[in-house]
Image: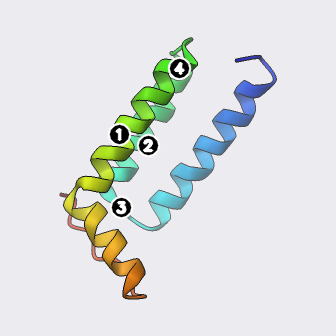
Amino acid sequence: MTEATEPVLLEETKGNLRILTLNRAPLASAQTKRLVARAGLLADLEQHLRDELELARRALTSQDGREAVKAIFEKRKPEFTGR
């Protein structure tokens, strides 16, 4: 990763965090906040991407993740429980 791409990646991650926070998906929001906080500490982009994929997998397989998908197909607002 170059110095030029670091700000772009950080801004993209912040944007994703804002979207998740607005939709109040507690698990996904917490995981994204962790990634953003660690982004400046990790020099290894590959490790960061692996971490991001693992957290996305966890979020999508959680009760909230299933509720989000179900709500999309039913065209309604999701009801998150934080599980």
Q: Which residue is mark 3?
A: 25
Residue at the spot of label 4: 46
Q: Quadrant of residue 40?
A: top right
Q: Residue furthest right?
A: 4
Q: Are marks 2 and 1 in contact (CB under 8 Å)?
A: yes
Please, what is the three-letter code of the amino acid marked with disc 3? Ala
Give the residue at x 74% y 35%: 8
Q: Residues within 10 Å of mark 1 (few under 14, many from 20)?
A: some
- Reading the chain from its start, which is encountered first: label 4 or label 1? 4
Q: Nearer the viewer, mark 2 or mark 1?
A: 1
Viewer-nearest of labels 3 and 1? 1
Which quadrant of the rendered structure holds the N terminus?
Answer: top right
How much space separates mark 2 and mark 4, taking CA atoms?
17 Å
Earlier in the chain: of badge 3 and badge 4, it is 3
As drawn, is 27 to the left or to the right of 75?
Answer: left
The residue lying toward the viewer, choosing from 11 and 51, is 51
Residue occupied by mark 2: 32
